[in-house]
Amino acid sequence: MHGTTVDVEGPKEEGMTRRRRYLSTMDLLTMAAVSVVGALFSAHVWAALMNVATPLFAFLGPVGWIGASGVYLIWPVIVGLLIAKPGAVTLYTLVQGFVEMLFGNAFGALAIVYAGAEGLGVDLGMGIFNWKAKLPGVLLGAGIGCVIVDEIYIFLFGLQSTETIIIGGITAFLSGVLLGGLPGWLITQALRRTGAVSRFGSEGYEALD
């Protein structure tokens, strides 16, 4: 009877542990901490950078602002690489959008929607690669996330036409890949090499539960 009890309860306890650790304490702390930094960058740093960089893409006409928009994907990509779990980036960006709203984002509550769409794109790209913390997944995800949000903006600003939708979509994808996915990957790799996330990164999360 004792042996039977162990056989029944062992897998049950194992399953409960896995469910409890889907998003660990450190996952949630990482999301919270990065969301504050990401919101500050989105509200101030990236906005200022966009004002400086947009003239460089004047040749794109009314969608020239899309050329530098990929920088908004850097923080979602970093979170995706650190946590690498289904839906984690979408959840993170919803939190970031909420913090942006608290910081006085010009879009108000819509910041939650736009940020969440960026995270959904990163999750979709990483999902194709089974949420592995690999470069191809985050590059694709950053491109998709940038396309989703920038196409929303095109319609929101009344700029929609066949030309702007196509050119804007291609530009957004390239911007997401080159200015969002790649820098996010490089920053994460640099943090790992310095040991900044070796104790607190994805490999050590469970130890803090």
Image (cartoon, rainbow, N blue to C red):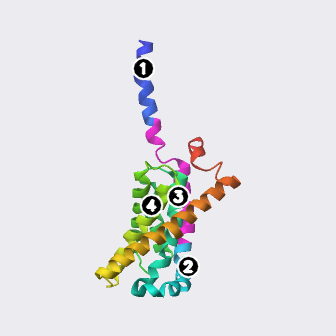
Q: Which is closer to the viewer, label 1 or label 4?
A: 4
Under tag 3, what secondary structure?
helix
**Amino acid bearing label 2:** His
In the picture, the disc for residue 140 is: 4
On-image quarter of the C terminus: top right
- Point out the frontmost of discs 4 and 2: 4
Of label 3 and label 4, which has the lower sequence position?
3
Q: How many neighbours does mark 2 have within 10 angstroms: few (below 14), some (14-19), or many (20 or more)?
A: few
Count of numbered tags: 4
What's the residue at 53%, 66% (across, down)? 74
- Left of 123 or right of it: where is 44? right
Alpha carbon of mark 2 to alpha carbon of mark 1: how far?
56 Å
Q: Which mark is residue 44?
A: 2
Magenta-span inclusion, residue 35: yes
- Circle 3 is placed at which residue position? 79
Front residue of 64 and 194: 64
Q: Earlier in the sequence, mark 2 or mark 3?
A: 2
Residue at horizontal 42 percent and vertical 24 percent from the top: 9
Badge 1 element: helix
